Image (spheres, rainbow, N blue to C red):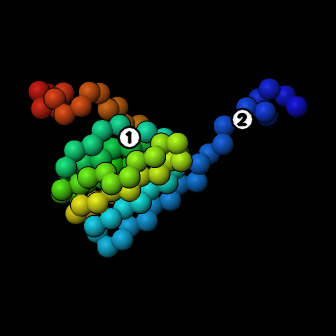
Amino acid sequence: MAYEEKYKTVDIPHNVIMEGRKKVSVSGVDDVESFDESEIIMSTSQGVLIVHGKELRIEKLSLDSGDVVMEGIVDRLEYEDDVKVSGGLFSRLFK
């Protein structure tokens, strides 16, 4: 067996389940780039997912299994292929 075959990366299945507009469960999450009450940005196996809303909070975060559960008022889910997230809240305030 070749080295590449033995250590091939496995794509984690990516699913988004929205319960009403108040709870979102996401699988296949590689990393949470940033979050605040109005926006959560996460890298998934299918690209960068941005959740827009109000009073957003992360209820469950398990990067080992790739699962994130968030609650709040969800206004919009948006995928972007190449999002450069630099810094956190302070870097966005001082642009």
The label shown at residue 56 is none
Q: Position of residue 66 (x, y in %)?
A: 50, 47
Q: Secondary structure at mark 2?
A: loop
**Which quadrant is the C terminus positioned in?**
top left
Q: In the rendered view, would you say 87 is above or below 82?
A: above
**Which quadrant is the N terminus positioned in?**
top right
Q: Position of residue 76 (x, y in %)?
A: 28, 59
Q: Nearer the viewer, residue 76 or 72?
A: 72
Residue 13 picture quarter: bottom right
Residue that label 1 marks: 32
The number of callouts visible is 2
The label shown at residue 8 is 2
Residue 53 picture quarter: bottom left
Would residue 79 be visible to someone looking at this image?
Answer: no
**Residue density around tag 2, few if under 14, some if 14–19, many if 20 or more, within 10 Å:** few
Q: Residue at x 73, y 32 (%)?
A: 7
Q: Position of residue 55 (x, y in %)?
A: 18, 56
Q: Residue at x 53, y 47 (%)?
A: 65
Would residue 61 be visible to someone looking at this image?
Answer: yes
Q: Residue at x 38, y 40 (%)?
A: 32
